[in-house]
Image: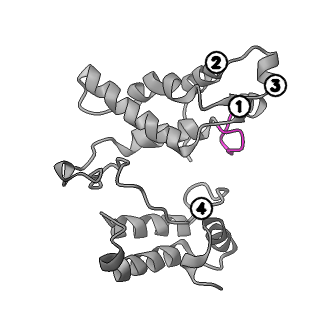
Amino acid sequence: MAELHDLTALEQGRAVRSGEVSPVDLVDHYLDRIGRLSDSVGAFVTVTDELARKQALLAADGVGDRSSPLYGVPTAVKDLNTTAGVVTQFGSATMAGYVPTVSDEVVRYAVQLVARSRPEDPLAPKYVKEYVRWGGSPRASQYLVLGAKARAAVLGKLCADYDCVRSVARQVLRHRLLLNFNARAQKLSSADVIDKLLVEPSVER
């Protein structure tokens, strides 16, 4: 096998599913590589090695959605994206040491809401599979959280909650959902699909 870091993300995912490589192997490989190259490359602001190993162990135990093509594959998050409990500085000295307070549960809700808008997702409702051609991308989840934080600030709340996410969902998602011919024949709009997603209970992965 080629060096793990030379494999594409999909190839790494296939290696994990086949048992050729474990999620822990991947995480340890990348953490070692980050440690060796950090001084010369400087690609990471914060390295969450303990969290990465904890999540890798959970994936190795089969926790989560094993049908995902990237199951068990570690990912990096840009310093521009708020991650609860992790220093996020937005590349700005004025934000040095900032630790976001958006809860994991709210972020997870936003991610699941967008995932359920994609017809190929295992958790997508029947009507999404029937009427939606393209759903929201991962970026939609990021902007749901950003919009929810702005909404919380306007309302004077200490942090964003589920209601804040729901209140900005239409604005964030309606131009990101592309409906198919079946939807147009039924005179449905993207707002109709979004409203239906919002009234249904979220499904834990």
Tell me which numbered mark, 4 or 3, is placed earlier along the sequence: 4
Q: Secondary structure at mark 1?
A: helix
CA gap between label 3 and label 2 equals: 15 Å
Image position, residue 33 (x, y; %): 42, 80
Image position, residue 19 (x, y; %): 65, 76
Mark closer to the observer (4, 3): 3
Relative to 142, residue 87 above or below: below
Residue occupied by mark 4: 71
Q: Are marks 3 and 1 in contact (CB under 8 Å)?
A: no
For residue 60, side relative to residue 166 (left or right)? right
Residue occupied by mark 2: 192
Write the start and end of the magenta stretch as one range.
Answer: 118-125
Displayed quadrant of residue 192: top right
Q: Which of the image's four quarters has the N terminus?
A: bottom right
Q: Secondary structure at mark 3?
A: helix
Residue occupied by mark 1: 128
Tell me which numbered mark, 2 or 4, is placed earlier along the sequence: 4
Q: Amino acid at mark 2?
A: Asp
Tell me which numbered mark, 2 or 1, is placed earlier along the sequence: 1
Q: Note whether residue 8 is visible.
A: yes
